[in-house]
Amino acid sequence: MKRMPRKTGQENEAMKSTEVVVVGAGIVGASTAYFLAKAGLNVALIDCRGVTGSGGASQACAGGVRHQGRVPIEMPLALYAIPFWKILEEELETDLHYRREGMTIVTDEENLVPRIEERVANEQLLGLDIRMVYGEDLRRLIPGISPRMLAGSYCPIDGHADPLRTVNALVSAAQRRGAVVKWCCKAQCLVKENGRIVAVNTSNGKIRCSQVVLSAGAWSRALAATVGVTLPFEPFTLQMMVTRRCPHVLGQVLGWLGHGISLKQVPSGGFVIGGGWPGHGDLATGKTALMPGSMAKSAFTTIALFPSLSKRSVIRAWAGIEAFSMDEMQVTGPISGVDGLFIAAGFSGHGFAIGPGVGSLIADFITTGRLSELLSPFNLDRFGSSGTEGKRNAE
Amino acid sequence: MPNDLRIKTHPFLKSEQQNRRWVSITVDGRPMEALEGESLSAALWAEGHIALRYDDGSNTFRGIYCGIGHCFECRVTVDGIPDVRSCLVQVRSGMRVSLQVAAETDKDDGRI
Amino acid sequence: MNSPDDLVICRCESVTLGKIRECLKSSAARTVNEVKKLTRAGMGVCQGRTCARTVELILEREDGTQLGTEPYQVRPPIRPVPLDDLAAGAEDFSEPTGPVSVVMLRKPLGTEGCDETHAPKNGARE
């Protein structure tokens, strides 16, 4: 009965200091830790949960990797970040089940067609490869879609990937590059002296550092408050469902304007059903519980969109807590008055696709001191003192 | 049918067995005889359909494992409904069963 | 335990003993739920009914993890439910009214949200 040696320097290694502490091992934190380690910095990635985390947004992620339907001001970032997925599998030496077979957002309401057309026109101007598809062409493009759908916005370079595999792969790759990953290590407060970060107090002791990347999703708000920074986030628990494996009939990701659904069929055959339906969550413990009404309504919407799924069985539902900001856009950027602190949270349900790219840009900033223009629209300053400036999502 | 491994006499199930009648069902389009009311997986096994499906992940054929509706290994399509646990389904006359095994074997009736 | 590494432990996802052993060797996974996340053992159609106990026994014998350290996390539905059965009761539910969207619901954040300069008593709400 040989006991396997424990890895990743957990209990027995008292980590006293490092250059950068990344708080939160979700898609953003894991990506950032990977690119920082790749750049040769000493980085510690800490997460209050056990290995692979639980209860956060990356856990309850639909896995969509899409350019369309994002806030217009985010398009340049998306056009930069999403191509990372093309090389990510090779870079991380892991199959992430990434597929790029397109996404179409449809409507069955005549009066909503112009709204999609307008968005498509705007997105084309921003440089996106996207076009409208109508009627019979739509049905040919997506066999199995409900015949009541009239039109849709089709972006052939949108796709999807497996969030669990991706986060696991990023964490493993970060470790291979020298990052220290500490699970069950809860950041309790950030420590600043003379206006700069000097340490993070954790459940495993104090870690001295000169930089902190706060990528702890819904848990970022409380941590930021410990150094006087207010993040206008509210936690929402989002539910997901997955069916058992089915023969492959759907290659695209489907969305339905005005209805809560994101439908895709993953390479292993199951249909992953998202759509932003709420569940119950407790921020303090990270525990989630399901809302049956969300399962029912999500199932109803799924069948209405793709009728042939009516007899397919849901085998599992789950939920995770996400941080939604006041204008449903992320906060990324350094904080004036707290040197060394970089916030990367509040992605409001759309951080997965751009996570790796954002992680790379954060690593660039930390290594060069120059913040990419792609991140500047998302600075915390935009909330000002009245906190009323906001931008609606495209749909 | 002789040597079909069905339990013909049983201290408790005697009366049930005696009252069962032979009915015809189809399996992958081919007619098959079975006892009305018996478990579909037992009927399939008696006729040599031990492999009920093909698993891509392990490249193996799968059939009954637990036999009590717990493991889902014995799932087949019945009357158009997929993923039905054959160990829990009782044979009814005219039932249409698909196994999706035939394509993976070189026997044209799918038997192993 | 001298079982060969290609023994299938999770039948639904075809996860072998070798894969589980590799997971224990190369990661920080120590509980049945963590092993599930890294190997997919327990993620298939029977949702761990067949293999969860076996994985726990493997953890005990190969790693010294005591049985019952962490209960196997079961997620609803407790058995597969066809989408149309789930959908049948959709109208009867008064909550939720729709998907989450802060902006679309025009839900204002709490007034203490933007003015705080010190840590709130119990972290964020919910």
Image (cartoon, helix red, strand yellow):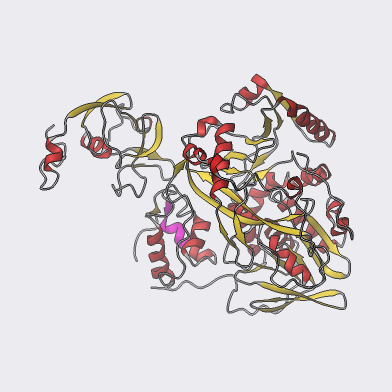
- Magenta-colored stretch includes residue B43: no
- Magenta-colored stretch includes residue C20: yes
Vertical arrangement, residue A42 with respect to residue A347, above or below = below
Vertical arrangement, residue A361 with respect to residue A114, above or below = below
- Hey, which quadrant is residue A342 in on the image? bottom right
Q: Quadrant of the N terminus of chain B?
A: top left
Q: Give the residue at x 33% y 37%.
A: B52
Relative horizontal placement of residue A354, taking residue C29 as reference (left or right): right
Main SS category, magenta section: helix
Q: Quadrant of the C terminus of chain B?
A: top left
Relative horizontal placement of residue A73, taking residue A61 as reference (left or right): right
Find residue A138 and report its horizontal and vertical position in percent: 65, 24
Provide the residue span drawn in magenta. Answer: C15-22
Q: Give the residue at x 61% y 28%.
A: A142
Vertical arrangement, residue B75 with respect to residue A372, above or below = above
Q: Give the residue at x 76% y 62%.
A: A39
Find residue A324 and report its horizontal and vertical position in percent: 73, 54
- The answer to whether residue A267 is seen in the rendering is no
Near-viewer residue (A215 or A179): A215
